[in-house]
């Protein structure tokens, strides 16, 4: 039977209830405004050993500086092998370690296109200088024009867990990996919740993997996550 871990993007206000219901969370706030060391260590202390923290790499490391930014012209973002990027990556790993995160998510924007140069940068990063501690792995979600098959092949080569939204095109084949990371972004953008049929389909897809992480990043993520959990446990109305 597949190990299915259900959670949401970032904690809700009622963190105690969340921790009583779910065993994973994606800390997307880490990619925008990282919490302080004290808060990260506090989050780590209040969760069990079974809980799976997922840390999102900072936006400065993943994305290139925007036009008009004081950082334009610096060798940042898009896995450029530079002193600045290596320093940022060190900060990402340090915060993940404080939290006890076993997965660091690389959430690349559409500007990170499937060019040969970008594929080479990602490859060199993963193989040469990511240098993750034992027991910590990378996951990658590619926005934009990447084909699912080429992402799956690259992840297989680099030992990275592929993250994707399987319900964008349910007819498209999923990779034959042991682990998968599903990020649900909404039935139609970020406004619609998922039907029971869609969630049942999602559960069926999860069963093809030894482990499936399911993160809801929707308008009402808790509602979707609780409904999927109820369907999985057979307690849905």
Image: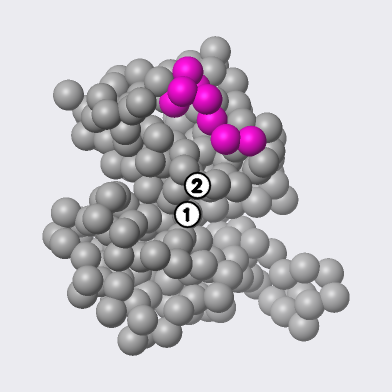
Residue depicted at 65% across the width and 51% down the height: 109
Name the secondary structure under disc 1: strand
Q: Which of 130 and 203 is in front in this view?
A: 203
Determine whether 86 is above or below 231 in the image.
below
Q: How crowded is mark 2: few (under 14 residues within 10 Å), some or many (20 or more)?
A: many
Q: Judge left or right: residue 221 versus residue 187.
A: left
Mark 2 vs mark 1: which is more N-terminal? 1
Determine whether 60 is above or below 205 in the image.
below
* Pointer 2 residue: 221
Place residue 205 in its image quadrant.
Answer: top left
* Pointer 1 residue: 9
Q: Nearer the viewer, residue 90 or 220?
A: 220
What residue span does the magenta drawing correspond to?
Answer: 192-199
Name the secondary structure under disc 2: helix
Which x, y percent locates residue 125? Answer: 46, 57
Determine the residue located farthest toward the top in the rendered image.
Answer: 171
Q: Is residue 125 magenta?
A: no
Q: Judge left or right: residue 91 versus residue 178.
A: right
State the quadrant of the N terminus.
Answer: top left
């Amino acid at each position: 039977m597949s190990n299915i871990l259900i959670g949401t993007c970032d904690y809700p206000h009622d963190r105690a209830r969340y921790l009583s219901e779910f065993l994973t969370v994606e800390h997307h706030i880490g990619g925008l405004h990282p919490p302080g060391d004290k808060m990260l260590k506090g989050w780590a202390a209040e969760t069990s050993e079974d809980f799976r923290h997922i840390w999102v790499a900072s936006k400065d490391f993943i994305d290139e500086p925007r036009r008009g930014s004081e950082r334009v012209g610096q060798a940042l973002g898009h896995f450029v092998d530079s002193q600045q990027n290596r320093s940022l990556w060190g900060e990402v790993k340090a915060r993940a370690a404080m939290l006890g995160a076993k997965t660091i998510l690389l959430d690349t924007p559409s500007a990170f296109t499937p060019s040969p140069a970008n594929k080479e940068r990602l490859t060199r990063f993963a193989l040469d200088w990511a240098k993750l501690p034992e027991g910590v792995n990378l996951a990658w979600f590619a926005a934009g024009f990447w084909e699912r098959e080429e992402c799956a092949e690259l992840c297989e080569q680099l030992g990275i867990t592929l993250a994707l939204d399987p319900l964008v095109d349910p007819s498209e084949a999923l990779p034959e990996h042991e682990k998968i990371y599903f990020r649900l972004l909404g039935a139609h953008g970020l406004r619609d919740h998922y039907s029971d049929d869609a969630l049942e389909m999602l559960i069926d897809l999860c069963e093809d993997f030894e482990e499936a992480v399911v993160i809801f990043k929707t308008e009402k993520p808790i509602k979707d996550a609780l409904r999927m959990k109820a369907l999985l446990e057979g307690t849905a109305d």
